[in-house]
Structure formats: structure tokens, C-alpha cells
Amino acid sequence: MASSRKKRRSNKSGRAPATPAGIAEALRDAIACGDLEAGSPLRQDRIAAEFGVSHIPVREALKQLVAEGLVIFIKNRGVVVSELSSKVAWELTEYRCLIEGQMARWAVPVMTDHDLAQAEQVLDKLDEETRIREILWLNTAFHAVLFTPADRPHFLASIETVRANLMRYWRLAWEDLGHKPRSQRDHRTLVALCKNRNAEAAGRARERHIRETGNLIVAYLNRKTAQYTTVITLAAYGPHGDVLRTVTGTNNC
């Protein structure tokens, strides 16, 4: 926990945020980047001491993270970081397809040359970046540049919540699966379609990109589950070798 605290402090120019929103953002960043792994407990007293606040803003921050699905409350254990789930990853992927594809269709007709230049500048930085934390936030910044012209603040807030939950899943794609080159090719294609003012094609390209990334993550999580779960069958035999009953369970290695 000590190393995680140090990393979270460094995100905000060395000064601990004292508001619920600031605390939630720091914890969200730590979860996304793997400083706080699935199952890690979030102790209110430790967090309060870290940020120099009372328990009240910490509780508010944790409530926000519970609502986003990043953490869960377990009786007798308190608040812990939620487990990675292929089911959740795919549901959020489907949600993104519905919302972000339409956001692209709304945004493209009103994009300015400045918007497109900004998007390309972010992609140039992404090409050179190797630090996972910076890659994740540059990726978020790229999509934000393309969403903002749509001028749909409620949709944008919903997208931001979903993307915050998915950030730690994307870390698997970028860090463990080497997805960055493919993702960047898709990003460049999307910008080209935006430049051509082809809103429908841009919407379809975004949906395809989202599904491909989602499929990659879900397949990875399913492989990990299969790798660490062994099925065990215990059988009770009668005097003549006949099976009286069986009990089947799993052993997580």
C-alpha cells in the first residue's frame, strides 16, 4: 500500500487532493494502472491519513467508485477493488458501441481543423510514449478530442464513467497483449474519416475498433480463467466398482 500511495500522490503535482472528486480520481488512476489490484482493500483510515482529510470525503469518494463498478462493498471486509470480469468487459464494450458510434456521427460534421490537428498531435505523442500510465491517459485524451464537438454533455459524462471502468482492462490490451500498434492504426483511420467528413463511416469504424478491442480483452480474460482453474471430480464407488455419486468442483491454482 505504501508504494501505491506514493504513486497516487505524484499524479497531482505532489499535492494530495482534499475533495471527494480528487480522492476518487487518484484512486481511479491507481486502479487503472495496476497500483491497486483486484481484491485490494481500501481502508478509509489509511486513505484519510494519506490525503490529510477526515473520513467524510473518503466515504463520498468510495461511494462514487462503487457506483462506477470499480470497487465493491463486502460484508465484514469493507471496500475492495472489484475483480476483472469478461462478462463486465463485454457488457461495457457493447455499451460503448451504442453510445460512442453515435457520438462520432454527431461530432464529425461540426469538427474544426483545430480539433483534427489536436487529435493528430495526441496520436503523435502516443506513438512515442512507452509508459503505460501516460499511454492510457493519452488514449483517453485522443477520444475526448473527437467526442467534444458533438456537444452532448450527458452522453459524454456517461462515456467517461464507462471508460473509467474499462481503463484497467485496456491496460491488459496495451501492456500484456501489445495492442498499441493495431490501436494506433485504427486511430489514424478514424482521423482520416473525420477529415473526409464521412460521419457514418467514422461511426462504423469506431464501433469496429471498440468490438475488436473488447474481443481481445474478453479472450485474454477467458484464457487466464482457464489457465488458473482446474476441474476436480471426486467419485464414491460401491463394492462392485459402480459409481454411487460424484462431486465436481474447481480448484483455483
Image (cartoon, helix red, strand yellow):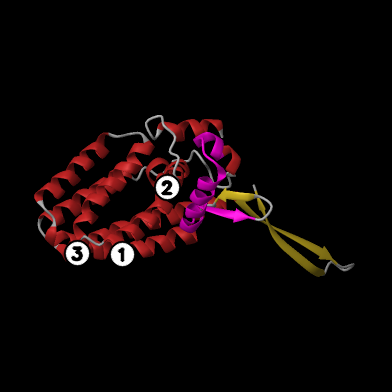
Q: Is residue 68 above or below residue 29?
A: below
Dot 2 or dot 3, earlier in sequence: 2
Sort mark 3 into few (<14), some (14-19) or many (20+) by Cα contacts within 10 Å.
Answer: many
In percent of width and height, residue 172 lies at 43, 45
Q: Nearer the viewer, mark 2 or mark 1?
A: 2
In percent of width and height, residue 66 lies at 51, 55
* Cβ atoms at labels 2 and 1 below 8 Å apart: no
**Residue receiving disc 2:** 21
Q: Amino acid at mark 1?
A: Ile
**Residue receiving disc 3:** 106
**Residue receiving disc 1:** 99
Helix, strand or loop for the magenta stretch, by majority: helix
**Image point 36% across, 42% down: which residue?**
178
Sort mark 2 into few (<14), some (14-19) or many (20+) by Cα contacts within 10 Å.
Answer: some
In percent of width and height, residue 43 lies at 60, 43
**Image point 18% across, 66% down: which residue?**
200
Dot 1 or dot 3, earlier in sequence: 1
**Image point 87% across, 68% down: which residue?**
238
Mark 2 to mark 3 CA distance (whole Å): 29 Å
